Amino acid sequence: MADGGTAADGAPVLSNAAWFARARRSIPGGVDSPVRSFASVGGTPYTVVRGDGAVVVDVEGRHYIDMVQSYGAVLLGHAHPAVTASVVEAAASGTTFGAPTPGEVLLAEAICRRVPGCDQVRLVSSGTEAAMSALRVARGFTRRDRIVKFDGCYHGHSDALLAGAGSGVAGLGLPGSSGVPAAAVVDTVVAPYNALPELDERVACVIVEPVAANMGLVPPAPGFLQALRQACDDVGALLVFDEVITGFRVGPGGASVLLGVVPDLWCFGKVIGGGLPVGAFGGRADVLSVLAPDGPVYQAGTLSGNPLATAAGRCVLDAVGPRDYASLSERVERFATDLAVVLGEAGVVAQVPTAGPLVGLFFSDRPVTSYAGAKASAATGRYGPFFTAMLRQGVALAPGPYEVMFPGMAHSDDHLDTVLAAAASAARQLAVGPLAG
Ligand SMILES: Cc1ncc(COP(=O)(O)O)c(C=O)c1O
């Protein structure tokens, strides 16, 4: 595409390549979050100008069926009219106050009403903050320091939780992060997912993605979460479910309701902000009573409970009911089955696991149950060429092998059929390409 001219909004008309080159001059690596880079798949990121439902449009006018949906922050589809109206209406009354608002009370109530056992939540501005704050509460409540996390689970980029993280950290081939002092992770124990870790009275909490979705999609093994619940109770440790992805996506009550295991603390994010920056941590009221101003555990945020985010989040939660989740999960289950079939027919060995409407993709001949299996799938090197072939056909997957697909309420059967047709063609290319075999 030729560069030049000015768009209606005053932005210069540039190609994807030109925007990315320009981004690299003012933004490190050209991206505000490393998962958006194409470092692990090759090529240049498409630069988005707008979205509509299941579709995003880039600066060159190309349309893509978007399976990323802001990594799960968008459930109803891009620019959903009701969500847009709720944000516009809220903004017209002021964007942030530094005083309590009805909107944050209503969103907190909406969350707690849907999640049995979650008595209270405090709103923050990201999933990272939610997980970081939940840890601090767990440590303050138990007066213990040690935390246990699982290999390949991602809980945001706070120092103590970056060890053994999946998602972008893994996609870039990093074992952890430089810049995290050894002292910050000295009390972090990393255990293999789907295996019961040894716990003792030094452990403040065990934090887990109840359905792991940052090492591809790895559902919990039967009995794993139940055993974890029991093991925590046995030593007086708290169980923390990080439902930043699964919350209000895998079902109306998230993973704890779907899987029938009640943690002591939850972390939420993504869906509850309707596409605006939000997070929340919550749980048992007696545990949360340690938080300032009532208790000694400090946690705060200028934009926490932001009126725009709470309006959008409430709008989304109100718009979807149990039947919507059930019908989306059914459609997605069919899609995943068909995806496995078209890949297999092209001679590409793959696994397509699901959890509710979450879909994973592993280039593996057996189900993946741990980070080791996810890494082996990524090491085949097949995801990059598959991703590129899909993008060329107008389907945007996440640019990394450790992410999942997020078909949502805006994805029609036609959209999903188009994705399947593209996958069949991409798989045929993969089967005859240099990576065949
Ligand atoms: C399970 C989980 N926890 C925490 C986070 C961090 O959330 P945020 O990116 O909003 O800081 C993420 C982000 O993808 C996540 O998937």
Image (cartoon, rainbow, N blue to C red):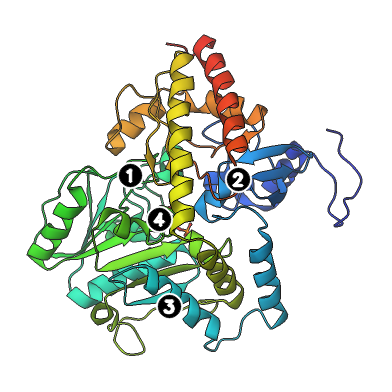
Mark 3 residue type: Glu
Q: Is residue 238 above or below residue 157?
A: below
Question: Is residue 42 visible in this depiction of the protein?
Answer: no
The span from disc 4 to disc 2 (Cα, nearest Å) is 36 Å
- Residue 29 circle label: 2
Q: Earlier in the sequence, mark 2 or mark 3?
A: 2
Mark 4 residue type: Gly
Q: Which class describes the residues within 10 Å of circle 1: few (<14), some (14-19), or many (20+)?
A: many
Image position, residue 320 (x, y; %)? 51, 61
Q: Nearer the viewer, mark 2 or mark 1?
A: 1
Q: Earlier in the sequence, mark 4 or mark 1?
A: 1
The residue carrying mark 4 has its beta carbon less than 8 Å from ligand 1: no
What secondary structure is found at the residue carrying circle 2?
A: helix
Q: Quadrant of the C terminus?
A: top left
Does the residue at mark 2 contact the one at mark 1 (Cβ under 8 Å)?
no
Q: Which residue is found at the position 25% from the left and 71% from the top?
A: 138
- Residue 109 circle label: 3
The span from disc 2 to disc 1 (Cα, nearest Å) is 24 Å
